[in-house]
Image (cartoon, rainbow, N blue to C red):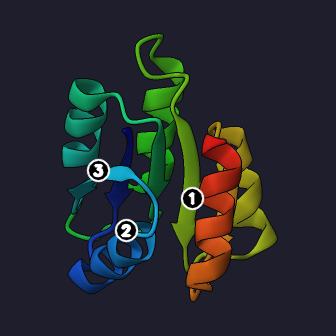
Amino acid sequence: MKKILIVDDQDEVRELVEVTLRIGDFKILQAENGPKALEIARAEKPELILLDVMMPGGSIDGFEVCEQLKKDPETEGIIIIMLTAKGQDIDKQRGREVGADDYFTKPFSPLELMDKVEEVLG
């Protein structure tokens, strides 16, 4: 069973994504901030991370989480899709710079998200 880590500071977004992904045969993990995302990613080695960019409270943001994971030989192979309201070209550019594999903008279509997840996890 493939593991997916959902990282978002909003409970309702994490729940919506989890409900969307229950259609597939996945083990769903959740983190509400950057440090927790790094901890879970390093311990569980999910195949995919759906990662929000903006996480308030002074914790590291999604771009920093992505960059740290992609620079670590233990986690560099994890597929990371940024799932964020920050949809401007400069944000997408930053996502590419830190190693994100794809970029999904909120609000998102659950069906399109499921299609993307199935595409990247094969």
Q: Give percent across and percent down for residue 121.
A: 60, 43
- Image depth: mark 1 or mark 2 in front: 2
Say which amino acid is labelled 2: Arg
Given contact means CB atoms under 8 Å apart, are the residues at marks 2 and 3 in contact? no
Q: CA distance from mark 2 to mark 3?
A: 24 Å
Say which amino acid is labelled 3: Gly
Q: Quadrant of residue 105?
A: bottom right
Give the residue displayed 28% in from the left and 78% down from the top.
15
- Image depth: mark 1 or mark 3 in front: 1
Q: Secondary structure at mark 1?
A: strand
Give the residue displayed 55% in from the left and 45% down from the top.
80
Tag shown at residue 39 = none
Tag shown at residue 34 = 3
The earlier-in-sequence mark between 1 and 2 is 2
Q: Quadrant of residue 111?
A: bottom right
Q: Give percent across and percent down for residue 25.
A: 40, 53
Query: What is the residue that sits farthest to the top in this orientation?
Result: 73
Residue that numbered label 2 is attached to:
22
